[in-house]
Amino acid sequence: MNIEPAVPTAKNPPAQFSGDVWLDPIAVPHESDQTMVVATVRFAPGARTAWHSHAHGQYIRVTQGVGRFGTRDGKVVDVHPGQTLYTPPGEEHWHAAAPGCFMEHIAMLQNAEDPATTTTWAEHITDADFNGK
């Protein structure tokens, strides 16, 4: 057993995020048969991801603020602290902080067999996507 070393907070790249979004890893695989990845992600008000999907799906637990999540069919939901959102494998979606507040969530997912294919990124969302129009 060991206490994991602290990893510096990283700002997420503008190629996949609009606005200020920071990531703090919680758990990453150590052994070849481990696939679990867990991170705390913090979004400034209105900051958002680009469209993306995950090979094995994703669980997101909102811990602070209000998270806004959308899917390609135009559905947009707001998720509050203590609520967990699940996106199934391959479902294109985005996540963001609702307007006017910071949002923090814990992201939980499994790496794909090739970790580089765990998340597939697409284009940035539009303001209409964000507003559910």
Image (cartoon, rainbow, N blue to C red):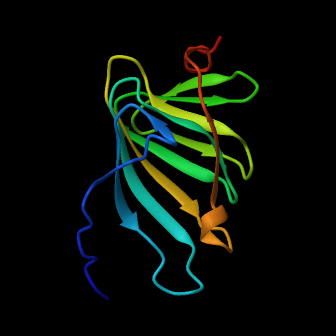
Among all residues in the image, which is located at the extreme front? 15
Q: Is residue 112 above or below residue 23?
A: below
Give the image location of residue 130, x and y in percent: 55, 20
Is residue 34 left or right of 64 when viewed as pictured?
right
At 64% from the left and 37% from the top, the residue drawn is 93
Front residue of 88/13: it is: 13
Spot occupied by residue 17 in the image (x, y as percentages of width and height): 47, 38
x, y (%) of residue 110? 59, 65
Residue drawn at x 51%, y 46% is: 60
For image coordinates 50% across by 42% down, the residue present is 15
Query: How many circles with numbers are drawn on the protein?
Result: 0
Give the quadrant of the C terminus.
Answer: top right
Pick whichever, 115 or 4, lies toward us.
115
Position of residue 95 measured from the top left corner of the image (x, y, whole percent): 52, 35
Question: Looking at this rendering, what residue extends furthest in the top direction?
Answer: 133
Viewer-proximal residue among 15 and 73 = 15
- From what the image shows, is residue 26 above or below residue 106? below
Q: Image quadrant for the N terminus?
A: bottom left
Left or right of 19? Residue 58 is right
Residue that appears at 57% across and 87% down: 32
Q: Quadrant of residue 7?
A: bottom left
Above or below residue 39? Residue 98 is above
